[in-house]
Image (cartoon, rainbow, N blue to C red):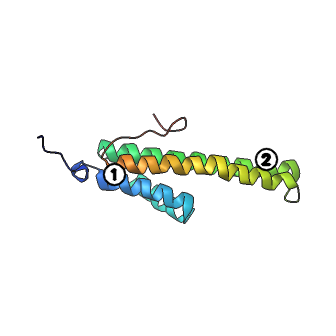
Amino acid sequence: MAERSDPADVPGYRIAVMAESMYLVNLMLAPGLAFLVLAWLWHRHHRDAPPLARCHLDQTFYVSLIGGAAIVVAVTLVILAGGLDWAWTWVIVVLYFTLIHSTLIMFGMLGLAKAMSGKLYVFPLIGKK
């Protein structure tokens, strides 16, 4: 039998896992604070990181920026369209979190699984190629 290598031995493994973890923490537990940690990781390591770490850093950082911009645009459009008293505002907010936010979390979990297995990952549609 061939000996299986440990994914933790892949250069950049710890940074890749940390980036994906911070992405998920930003979406679910500590928005903003976890993004600052992710931005610091990206700024510190993206130029000289091994390919695995660079891939996961770029994916999580850019998708976080796109996701943050999407929610700001969505909220702004909803408030401009009808304000906070408009019944459809809350329908749209619930739909956003049910569809978009949940999808970003699902892709983040897939990215974390790929990072933990020492593999590269590109977010579908909005990931940085």
Amino acid at the residue labelled 2: Leu
| Image position, residue 43 (x, y; %) | 42, 53
Q: Is residue 19 left or right of residue 2?
A: right
Amino acid at the residue labelled 1: Met
Q: Residue at x 51, y 36 (%)?
A: 124
Which of the two residues, 117 or 48, is positioned nearer the viewer here? 117
Closest to the camera, between mark 2 and mark 1, is 1
Disc 1, SS: helix
* Residue 47 visible from this viewpoint: no
Mark 1 lies on residue: 116
Which of the two residues, 31 or 102, is positioned nearer the viewer here? 102
Q: Is residue 91 left or right of residue 117?
A: right
Mark 2 lies on residue: 77
| Image position, residue 15 (x, y; %) | 34, 54
Considering only vertical position in the picture, is 116 above or below 121? below
**How crowded is the residue under tag 1: few (<14 C-alpha within 10 Å), some, or many (20+)?**
some
Which of the two residues, 116 or 37, is positioned nearer the viewer here? 116
| Image position, residue 41 (x, y; %) | 41, 56
Q: Earlier in the sequence, mark 2 or mark 1?
A: 2
**How crowded is the residue under tag 2: few (<14 C-alpha within 10 Å), some, or many (20+)?**
few
Q: Residue at x 48, y 37 (%)?
A: 128
Q: Is residue 111 left or right of residue 82?
A: left
